[in-house]
Structures are given as C-alpha cells and as structure tokens.
Amino acid sequence: MLKRLDKIRFRGPRTRDDFPDLAESPPASDNECSDDMQLKPRGSSERYSRELRNAGSGSPTMAAAIQDFQRSESDRLNEVKGHLEIALLEKHFLQEELRKLREETNVDSLRQELERERSKRIDLEQKMNEVLKTRGCIHTHLFSVADKQQKEVWSSRLQKWLYERFGVYIEDFRFQPEESTVEAEEPLSAKRLTENMRRLKRGARPVTNFLRNLSALSNWHSVYTSAIAFIIYMNAAWHGWAIPMLLFLAILRLSLNYLIARGWRIQWSIVPEVSEPMEPPKEDLTVSEKFQLVLDVAQKAQNLFGKMADVLEKIKNLFMWVQPESTRKLYICLWVAFITSCVLPYKLMGFMIGLYAGIKFFIIDFLFKSCPKLRDKYDTPYIVWNSLPTDPQLKERTNATVSRRVQPVVSRSSLATVPCGVSREEEAGRSHSTKKGAFHEIFNLQESERPLAVCENGWRCCLINRDRKMPTDYIRNGVLYVTENYLCFESSSSRSSSSKKNKVIKLVDITDIQKYKVLSVLPGSGMGISIATPSTQKPLVFGAMIHRDEAFEAIFTQYMKIMTTTKPPATGSGEE
C-alpha cells in the first residue's frame, strides 16, 4: 500500500497541499473504491465521446478536439482517482492511528473517571452547602443564645436593682402556701386548769368591769354621775357630736391606761366602780376537790356553749321564718328603716339615732328593768327575743303536736277492746309488759299492779346486795320499777327468765330510804339509793342511777303515801 501511495504521489509535481483537506472531503467508507464507482465516470465519458463522434464525424479538427478532450478527461479521471486513493489511504491510516490512540489513552475509563470525579464534586458541593447551612444555623443559634444571654444579664441586673430598691415590699406580697401548724396539746392537770381559770378571769376582768359599769350607769346606780352623763350625751347628740364624743372618750381611756402603765396612780373613772368578790387561792387540792374542779369547769363550759348555741339558733330561726310573727316585725322594721334612709338626709338620720340611743339607754332601759311587768308588755325586742324558739324547743313542740293528734285516735280504738266491768287502769296494767313478758307475770304480782307513769320504762341501775358473798349475787344489773305498793327490780341476766334473780320489795316493809354514795372519794352526793328492810342485815343499794334524784323522789313520795294511809293494801308476794 505504501508503494502504491508513493507511485501516486510522484505522478505529477503536486504536493500535499494540492489535495483537499480530509475534514472538507465527504465521509466515505472503505468500499468507496469499488469498481462500480470507477465505471460510472468511464461510461459517462464514453457516452459523451460517442456523442461527440457522431456530432463531428465529418471534420478532422473536430475529431482531434474530441480526442484531446478524451485524453484530458482520462487524465483528469486518473488524477481524481489518485486523489481518492490517497484520501482513502490517509483515512485508513488516521483510523488506525486513532484506534491506537484510543487503546493507548483508554478514553472510556477516563470518561468514567471524569464522571465519577464530577459526581464526587457535586456531592462535595452539596456537602459544602449543607455544612454552610448548618454553620449558618449554628451562627444564628449562637447569635440568638448570645442575645438571650445578654437579655438575661440585663433582666438579672434590673431584677437585682429592683430587689435592692423594693425588695422589702415585694417580699410582703409574695404568695406562700399556708402552713398547717399543729399545736401541742397539754395533758389534763388540775394545777394547769386552775391557773387557766385564773388567767381567764384576769383577762376578762376589764371587759366585765366595763360592762358592769355601763349597766350601773344605765340603772342610775349613782344618780349624780348618771345625770351628768345623760346631760353630756344628749347635748352632744343634739349638736351632732355623739360619735366624736365616743371617740374622744375612747382616746381618753387609752391615755389614762398609758399613764397607769407608766406608774401613775389614777383612781378616776367615768362610771362608778362596782366591787367584785375575790376568791381565796387554793394551792393544795385533794383528789375530791380536783375532781370537783373539773366538774365545775365542765359545767361552766357546758352552760356557756349552751347559751351560745341558743343565741345562734334563735338568730337562725328569726331569719328563717320559723316563727312568722317575730320575723314579720323584723321585716317591717327593715322596710321602714330602708325607706327612711332613702328619704331623710344622713345628718338628720344620725341625729335621730343618737337621740333614740340616749333615751333608750338612760330612761327606757331603766324603766323596763325597774318594772318587769311593763317590760313584759311593751319591750318589743325583749318580747320577740324571748319568744324565739331554739331547735330543742321546736322539736318538743313538734312531738307534742304529733302526740295530741295521735292520742284521740288511740283512745277511741282502745275503748272498743276494753271489756265491760274492767276499768282503764286495770286494762293499762294488764297491757303493760317488759322485755321478757307481762309485768305482773315477771314479778308474780296482781294484774292491777303496774309501774307508775314516772317510771314506765324503769330506771337502769345495779343492785348491790351486801349480804351475799358470791360475785354473781353481790352485784346484778337490771331495771328498777315502782308501783303503787311494790318496788320491783328486774335483773338483766339471761338466766333470770324464771324470776329467781328478780327482787320485789313491799313499800310498807321499808324501814329506811335515803340517798347513798357508793364511792366516798368521788365528789357530789352520789348516784345510789339505799333501802333498808327487816329481811336484810345490810341495806340494799341501787347504784349507778343516772336519774337518781328523780327515782328517789318518786319512790319516797309513793312510800310516804303508803305509810300515811290508815289501812295498808293486801300483801302480795315477798322476796323471791
């Protein structure tokens, strides 16, 4: 191929520059040098030469021209053919060179590596962008934190400044949960109780003295002092100085107390002094005196709490229309006071109230206290207050009303069941029964014997028979009844159904009856009744009776009634 290329190159004085550029030449494959492509220009030239021969067969010049033309055409064709062969050879050469270069340089791997590097670069750029974004967020967060810290620093400085200036006042308004403090309770002690009673009396002495002195001033205990106080007060009320006068008296009292506390001896008082009895102090108390002291304190506390409860219940019932007559008066007075306060000026209202208070305190109250009948008729507040019922009184009224409603129905129904010739008392005695059966059957008595009305349910007590030595016979719990002729004790023992442990005493057989104190150490008169009979060596004692005085009065009254009769009733069963 190289030899052919050299031959083609040296056919004429042409250089490489005379050939067309490979890039400008049309693309062609290796098959472009086939015989078909070479025969086409030959056929066309022969056809062209044949036409020329036919056209110029008559002249020799024309034939010579045609021959020259044919020669030039063949030379040109050979030249073109040489150019094409050179171009094809160069193409093959360049393709071989390009193939070798591709194999040497490995362009595909380079492209892949380039693509990989490009993807890595894109990933790095994305990571860099993310890092930059995170850095920006971090910077923003750091800036916000720094700003917040700066604000906190300023706020802490401001709070510190405010606390230094107004901290004392802020602490006063700070809300704190209320702490529940449990006070330590002292044990019960007679000495401590006595001391507290004395402290209570000393602490309440100024208040009680003031109230007593006011009562003495209202009662005109000292006519001269009360008259002067009345004139001064009415003059102040007339000129509208009642409230300033009372405030001035309070200031004067406090000033006198200050001087007395500083050591001054001032015996002057606005109202007359009322002497108070002083009790001698008791240091050493016996057991009985200590117990009695506890009972006295409990009694006073009971009475005080009872009075307070009565006052509160009366106020509640007054406002709840429990007694409409009293509440209606209060309702009318409130309406009159409301209308008067809306119509009259306050200065005139104060003048009228001051005059009424002075007249009531110095004159009306004195007349009512001196004349109780007049007070019961015309003292409206006193009448309304006393007529107000307490809750126990309301309960008693309700029970009484219900019993009055039920009683006629019961009486009418009982008349139908009473047989002819039998009195109501006998029927009532026959119908009365205890927990274990009929009363006369339990004690083996006549059917006419029944408990008195005062002891219809009996008195719970314990029978102490000091003639017996067995513990079961010495003390027995039960219920004590009194009838017209007998004193009956029903034992509460479960084995007394045969009435062996019940006790029946004739009232006419009693030789002595008196109140009895089982334990001499305890204060008071005791809670027992001692009854002596001829059949016992030692008196029988019915102790632990809550209503001892009531039982003693009923038994003693019936006993005296029996003893004063001329003829005692027929005897019944004795002691069982």
Image (cartoon, helix red, strand yellow):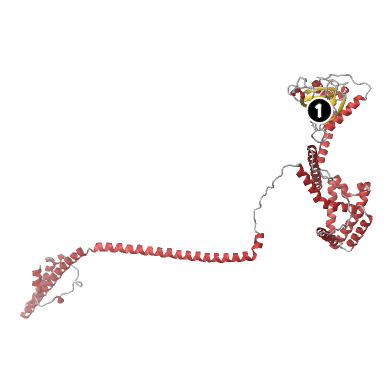
Question: In the image as oriented, which residue stretches furthest toward the left?
Answer: 60
Judged left or right of residue 50, residue 145 is right
Under mark 1, the amino acid is: Phe
Q: Quick one: SS at disc 1?
A: strand
Q: Is residue 319 visible?
A: no
Please identify the quadrant where the C terminus is shown.
top right
Using the image as rendered, state which of residue 543 and residue 426 is in the foreground: 543
Q: Residue at x 11, y 66 (%)?
A: 35
- Nearer-the-camera pick, 448 or 247: 247
Image point 19% across, 68% down: which residue? 27
Image vertical order of residue 404 relative to residue 442, above or below: below
According to the image, label 1 marks what residue?
Answer: 542
Would residue 381 appear left or right of 470 to someone viewing this image? right
10 Å neighbourhood of mark 1: few (<14), some, or many (≥20)? Answer: many
The percent coordinates of residue 110 (x first, y second) are: 25, 63
* Quarter of the image where one finds residue 301: top right
Q: Quadrant of residue 463?
A: top right
**In which quadrant will I find the N terminus?**
bottom left
Q: Quadrant of residue 517?
A: top right
Tally the numbered discs. 1
| Picture coordinates of residue 507, whole percent (x, y) | 87, 24
Q: Is residue 292 left or right of residue 133?
A: right
Q: Is residue 40 above or below residue 514?
A: below
On screen, 298 above or below 271? above
Residue 297: x and y, percent? 79, 42
Residue 362 visible in the shown view: yes
Q: Nearer the viewer, residue 265 or 539?
A: 265
**x, y (%) of residue 508?**
88, 22
Question: Residue reaching furthest bottom?
Answer: 61
